[in-house]
């Protein structure tokens, strides 16, 4: 079956970004001048998917407005002959067909994904965490997961090798490497203590699923932190279907915490022609005083 749908859960409170996240979602925080969520949407669109469902919570209207047209602003930019800026904002609203569904209570990632059931129907879908950016030298991670799905017709997940001291912050996979960087999954466990972790390969915010995941999610009781954990449903699904893991060949940027958010901004800014050279100079300058 062809993959035509993507789901982005973006409903969390973003408590780590208060007060900035009080009235806007953390996914709208900019990396230089572009909201994080826009990079995620671009990754999906570049993978050939144009039907996108966002699972949103409170204070998420800014996301809707960002991807909608803004006729007043367009008229203003046109009148002032700011045509480059006009194109930038028009392109955003033409990116994809974005739908929204509200997660009524924030009961964890598994619950957020469950909200997509009706929209997804009986089709496979990709799932991208809205606060994670992936940079890969060999094409987008989403495209790579779609390629695995096309090969096996089974679920797949992106994995990142993390510092063993941090395995208790992630969903962890245990499995057998069947090809360079490709794993047949034997086990998924959410945020295990180090002595119970089957590896240090962490689930890295990009997934592809058969629609059967919903049957397992439906039966998943609250797990870690009293929340419905997607990882627990993935573990249950292993009783019925195979799953694959792909080791990330690149970088994962987590904008969900302040320090990584700042690092991500610097990382992306340094690569840009407009602000990169100036920022590099500034960093050299302050480096002497650190
Ligand atoms: C979620 C998932 C976890 C995954 C992580 C990646 O955890 O539950 O399996 O490894 O995202 O960022 P969270 O960061 O929401 O606690």
Image (tube, grey):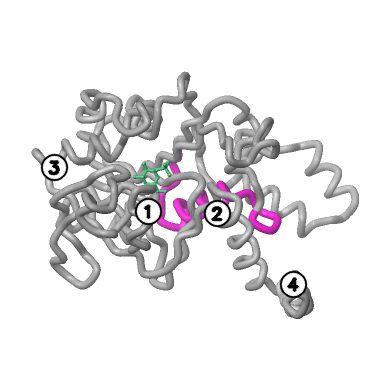
In three-dimensional space, the C-alpha distance between marks 2 and 3, rounded to whole angstroms, equals: 31 Å
In three-dimensional space, the C-alpha distance between marks 1 and 2, rounded to whole angstroms, equals: 16 Å
Looking at the rendered image, the quarter that the C terminus falls into is bottom right
Ligand 1 within 8 Å of the CB at mark 2: no
Region of the chain picked out in magenta, as a range: 31-52
In three-dimensional space, the C-alpha distance between marks 4 and 3, rounded to whole angstroms, equals: 48 Å
Q: Is 107 rendered above or below residue 72?
A: above
Give me the disc on residue 204. 1
Q: Which residue is at 41% across, 39% downward? A: 7
Q: Earlier in the sequence, mark 2 or mark 3?
A: 2
Q: Which residue is at 66% across, 37% downward? A: 18
Q: Earlier in the sequence, mark 1 or mark 3?
A: 1
Give me the disc on residue 279. 4
On the rendered structure, is 234 left or right of 81? left
User: Residue 36 versus residue 76: which sits nearer the camera?
Assistant: 36
User: Could you say whether the residue bearing mark 2 is in a helix, strand or loop?
Assistant: helix
């Amino acid at each position: 079956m062809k993959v035509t749908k993507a789901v982005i859960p973006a409903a969390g409170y973003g408590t780590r970004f208060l007060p900035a996240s009080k009235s806007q979602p953390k996914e709208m925080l900019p990396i230089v001048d572009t909201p994080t969520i826009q990079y995620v949407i671009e990754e999906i669109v570049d993978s050939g998917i144009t039907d996108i469902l966002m699972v949103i919570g409170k204070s998420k209207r800014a996301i809707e407005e960002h991807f909608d047209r803004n006729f007043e602003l367009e008229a203003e930019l046109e009148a002032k002959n700011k045509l480059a800026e006009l194109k930038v904002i028009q392109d955003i609203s033409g990116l994809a067909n974005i739908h929204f569904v509200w997660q009524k209570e924030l009961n964890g990632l598994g619950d957020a994904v469950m909200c997509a059931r009706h929209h997804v129907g009986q089709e496979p879908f990709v799932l991208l965490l809205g606060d994670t950016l992936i940079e890969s030298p060999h094409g987008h991670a989403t495209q790579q997961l779609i390629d695995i799905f096309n090969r096996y017709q089974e679920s797949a997940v992106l994995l990142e090798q993390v510092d063993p001291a941090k395995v208790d912050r992630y969903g962890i996979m245990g499995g057998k490497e069947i090809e360079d960087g490709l794993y047949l999954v034997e086990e998924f466990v959410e945020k295990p203590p180090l002595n119970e972790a089957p590896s240090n390969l962490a689930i890295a915010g990009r997934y592809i699923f058969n629609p059967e995941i919903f049957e397992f999610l439906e039966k998943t009781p609250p797990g870690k932190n009293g929340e419905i954990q997607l990882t627990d449903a993935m573990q249950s699904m292993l009783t019925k279907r195979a799953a694959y893991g792909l080791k990330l060949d690149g970088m994962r940027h987590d904008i969900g915490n302040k320090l990584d958010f700042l690092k991500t901004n610097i990382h992306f800014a340094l690569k840009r022609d407009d602000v990169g050279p100036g920022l590099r100079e500034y960093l050299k300058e302050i480096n002497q005083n650190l």
